[in-house]
Amino acid sequence: MKTPILSCCLLLAAGLLFPTALWAQDANSADAEPVTAQESDAQRFWFGSYGRLQPATHLDGARGSQSRIVWPAPRVDEGSYAELEFGYQAFRGEGGLQVDTVATLAFGDQFFHFNRDFDADIAVRNLYAEARNLVFDGAVLWVGSRMYRGDDVYLLDFWPLDNLNTFGAGFGWRGDFTRIEAHVGVNQRKDQYQFQVVDVVDERFIGSQDVIFLDRQRFISSLKAEQQFGGRNDAIGFKIKAHTELHALPSGEIRHDQPRTEETLPSDYGWLLGAQFGVWNFAPRSFANLFIRYAGGLAAYGEDAIPFGLNQDKRAIDAYSLLFALSGAYEHDYFGLILGAFARYFVDADRIDEDFDDGWDLAWSLRAIAFLPHYFTPGLEVSHQLRRPNGLSPVSLQQETASLWKLSLLPAFTFGDGLFARPQIRLNYTVSILNDAAQRLFPIDDRRRTNSVEHFIGLGVEWWFNSTSYQ
């Protein structure tokens, strides 16, 4: 089990030592200088943001909430979220060398003007420095905490191939048509799967002392390569991208209080292979992407999930998942279409063939938008979610397929040209229709357990600009 962790460490070491060696050979010919003081800060500083806010109700006075039976699900009724990004060009040298620092603050769905609570839901999503054109043209080196991801499926708010929230480092080369990048990072959930603090008797003083008893980080390394063909000057373009990940988790000990025992948590690992095929400019501002991803072990559950349905050795190595995803947009002079879809087959590690935790999840969403005068862009969206477990429902004791349909009316004002122009101010009226099997997925006393039809009405706004996370 030491091999995956060792591989992660070697990958990081290679990324740090290789540019260092080349720099030593070229140091005499590249005398870099920091950005001069005479340059205006406005030329070196940028501000970006992404945001969506949607005060909403279910028409009976309750707060509007998302109806979903799979993840990811159509985003039309999802909660509010915002990011503020601050970037600064900290250094510029000869040969196009540039070093940027980026900090992104994120705010969850807790706002003072709604709940009158000064405690906000805040996270640091980016905090890193990135050097470009270091040693040779196109070279990239970064270290820090960041969202490290590729193309998304907008209507599902989902990154199907490469979507890592990592605390680590990366290096690579970015050319005009070719990109090759590697990275290694760690994460650690503050729960008893990866981290535990216990009270012990302090031998020096009266009382007790907190000691870290379980301390195991998940190591994740990734390697991705992308090749583009054409796509410049409004010509049709194609691309193919390959992505792979290696996940590793060391063994550890966890302490239980009642009865007082210690349990060994074994080491574990996982892996992921995926590809993306893309085309764009077949019509103005139009594109299509197909994603395929196969994952095993820890990677089948996700980068930070706690595995369930483990095998007899309490490992996740027997789990696997296969995912297909599709995103696309087509734009005409007077209307546009946006499509998002995914299908995933998941099997956990317990080797039970007829397991309610295993099976197919599927969702698709199609949005049509008209481009009318005075920035008026009314839209109509239809979506479907489906979940078909391999095992019997614990409620009905039958194998059943859960289904949830949504129909949304989205009159909006969009300030800019195109389907993805922002900012956008909109009205959102969404009807969700659940079948009996879908209702039984919700717990007792949840409103969706007894309501086969859910009404959602909200006033929404969405924007993005100058954000490295939302290009």
Image (spheres, rainbow, N blue to C red):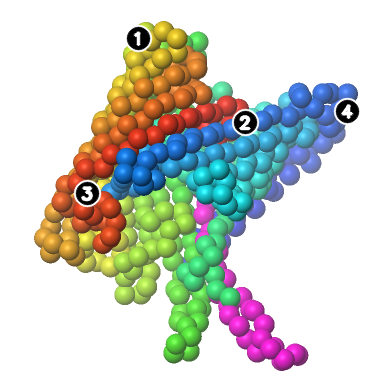
- Mark with earlier residue (3, 2): 2
- Which percent across, then down, holds residue 67? 31, 45
- Mark with earlier residue (3, 1): 1
The residue indicated by pointer 3 is 451
- Which percent across, then down, holds residue 467? 58, 31
- Which percent across, then down, holds residue 297? 37, 60
- Mark 3 is surrounded, within 10 Å at the Cα level, by few (under 14), some (14 to 19) or many (20 or more) other residues, namely some
Q: Amino acid at mark 3?
A: Asn
The residue indicated by pointer 2 is 48
Q: Secondary structure at mark 1?
A: loop
Q: Secondary structure at mark 2?
A: strand
The residue indicated by pointer 1 is 334
Residue range corresponding to the magenta coloring: 198-222
Marking on residue 37: 4
Residue at coordinates 68% horizontally, 36% vertically from top-left?
86
- Mark with earlier residue (4, 3): 4
